[in-house]
Amino acid sequence: MRTAEPLTVPHGPTAVDPARWPDVAAVPAASRARTAVTAAVVRHALRELPLRVRLAGGETLGQGGPLLEVRDPAAFHARIGTGGLVGFGESYMAGEWDAPDLVAALTVLAAHTADLVPAPLQRLRRLWAPRHPDEERNTPDGSRANISRHYDLSNELFALFLDDTLSYSAAVFRGFPASWDRLATAQQRKIDRLLDLADVRAGTRLLEIGTGWGELALRAAARGARVTSLTLSREQRALALERVRAAGLQDRVSIELCDYREARGEFDAVVSVEMIEAVGAEFWPAYFRVLDERLAPGGRVALQAITMPHERMLATRSTFTWIHKYVFPGGFIPSTQAIEETVRDHTRLRLARRDAFGAHYAETLRLWRERFAERAEEAGALGFDETFRRLWTFYLAYSEAGFRSGYLDVQQYLFTKENPAR
């Protein structure tokens, strides 16, 4: 295939490779009328926000607050008018807008997300919002492809911004503000708390759904548990196996390239950390039935899950977003109500405990984002160009803003199975 020459985005920070980033390199064609309507809607929304939005040419909108600079208003409005939130993120990747404090600006937008689109347009969301591609449904084959697109990017990339535990989920800190030198301990504290919830000890038969890079399996095996861990990521499995061998725990840890629906056997405990977000609402009943079916009577499930408000979950359930397109294809964040109703209606599990700690995720993400920024040149040396680095910066900042605004939260759940009869 012929490689096209990179195009330079006007006012942007870098050349965008159209072969790698076709939808970023090219501003979508939009009619004058559509762009004008979009500009009017965007201006109306921004005027009421506690933001200071400065458009190229000198116009300023907003009620004051974090600065958001729109360098190319025509492209900015054309992208939003044709792609909504996808276009908003692509406009950032293209360098058409920026913010000195990206998290602060995105936190304002996240806090007002339900009000940004006028109510009449909200009611017509199904007509204008992009839909999920059918190939990204989380069927067994779809899940393998979706997981690979994120987690198989490069173990070296993730190692640039994760701590030595290689934990890619919310840590639990003792106090704020968090610091990098406390992150590994905070991640181990999170893991130990989940293992304690599941009552994992010497001799426990533990099923882990979602291996990551193996830290939870290692800590469970160090307690004397026998761990079966499932993953769909070949890259993660390879490195997790290396870590297991280096720790001399091969006799206690088995890491299988296996979909959760293919799990077999009976276990005293099941632990799953931020895996449900990759399952998809369509398959939540199947996921929780597997937890139930694999768990022995008297066993315990410890689950860590990112959550969002139920009303927003219902409103956005069918919407295809920038995060889906560029970061987590097939992903969908549940609400606490959705989790608890699915467990109640489809399993014999019973909710015993739920603890929220969203502020800890905001700090975890801040540390990852700052670390990634510090090591941007190393990411470039691995082959991740500046457009990708803007993508990854936006992803981490966007996620942090979700937790800082309260739009997102994270929970640790304990479910029990005391009675084998329904």
Image: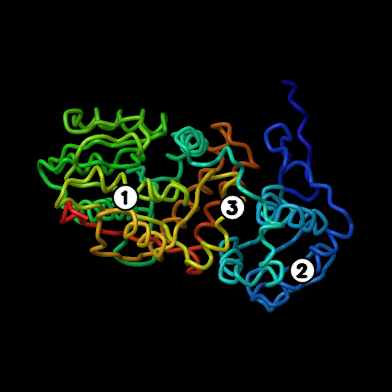
Q: Are marks 3 and 2 in contact (CB under 8 Å)?
A: no
Residue 274: % across, % down? 38, 50
Q: Earlier in the sequence, mark 2 or mark 1?
A: 2
Q: Residue at x 24, y 27 (%)?
A: 245
Q: CA distance from mark 2 to mark 1?
A: 45 Å
Asked whether disc 2 touches disc 1, contact meaning CB atoms under 8 Å apart, the reply is no
Which residue lies under the disc numbered 3? Answer: 394
Name the amino acid type tagged 2.
Val
Question: In the rendered image, which residue does mark 2 sit on?
Answer: 41
Question: Does the image show residue 153?
Answer: no
Seen at 66% across and 75% down, the residue is 49
Asked if one can make out residue 292 in the rendered structure from this viewpoint, the answer is: yes
Which residue in the structure is indicated by mark 1?
Answer: 184
Who comes first in sequence, dot 3 or dot 2?
A: 2
What secondary structure is marked by label 3?
helix
Q: Nearer the viewer, residue 100 or 298?
A: 298
